Image (cartoon, rainbow, N blue to C red):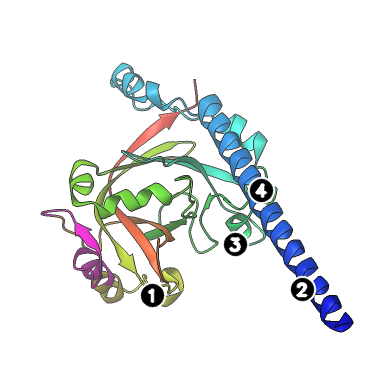
Amino acid sequence: MKNKKVILTVVITVLVLLIAGSGGYILFKNINNRQSSEKYDNLASSYAKLSESSTSQTEGASSSAKPNPIDFSSLKKENPDIYSWINVSGTEVNYPVLQSSTNDNFYIDHGVDKEYSFAGAIYSQFCNHLDYSDRVTVLYGHNMADNSMFASLHSFEDEDFFKKNSEITVYTPDTQLDFTVVSAYVFDDSHIMNCYDFKKDEVYQNFLDGVLHPHSISSNVRDGAKLDITDRILILSTCLNYGEGRYLVVGKLTKETPLSDYR
């Protein structure tokens, strides 16, 4: 009987510790996520004056370059790995984009301040240049429960939303790149940049054909969209809400506009 009481006590103690540990982990994660969201909100409000971009474009229409709405000089003081800024119409995506010079996946679990973060950052890998000159550029972001990072890209699963929203805008220190969303679909979990040799025209065209005719359990494709090997595309990649694989939002580069220094 005494042994049974000891065993029962040990079991209860272990369960209590597990529950306490789980609760502590959840609390830590929630606090970490909230702090991460606040940091990104502060960056956006301080250094990304996107509300002025349309006015600035009109005012600067007669010059060769319009003012850059992103204060990259200040952003790079926060973190020199910041090389662009992305905004996706109709979603919560309005973030700096980073690429580590030392660790390909550093920003999968580190925030813009280089501190550990469940939310991580929006980032690209070494295989992509920082000026979006590659045929295919892939940006990664987590599918967060609070709808931050790339979670709101899942809005493109809704057909009506997809039809009404098509703009992806990327800002670099000297260029605004406008992409039109041509498709959004569930993909497998293979590494796109490692699995395809996009330098080969045939390989690239076959991939583009798959973008416009995805074999997917969930997909939306822009009516009349066309892609060929002269096009450059941007792929936004995030996790699914269920199972394994990735959810991709693919944009075609439609316009490049020179930018002058931040006002």
Identify residue for label 2: 11
Give the answer, above or below, for where 227 lies relative to 54. below
Tell me the residue that label 1 is attached to.
Answer: 196
Compare marks 1 and 2 and give the one earlier in the sequence.
Answer: 2
Q: Are marks 1 and 2 in contact (CB under 8 Å)?
A: no
Query: Of callouts 1 and 4, which one flags the residue occurring earlier in the amino acid sequence?
Result: 4
Sequence-first disc among 2 and 4 = 2
Q: Amino acid at mark 1?
A: Tyr
Q: Give the Cα distance between marks 2 and 3.
A: 40 Å
Q: Magenta span covers which residues? A: 207-224
Q: Residue at x 40, y 70 (%)?
A: 245
Name which residue type carries label 4.
Answer: Leu
Depth check, mark 4 against mark 3: the one in front is 4
Residue type at numbered disc 3: Asn
State which quarter of the image contains the N terminus. Answer: bottom right
Question: Residue 226: percent from the left, percent from the top?
Answer: 16, 58
Mark carried by residue 105: 3
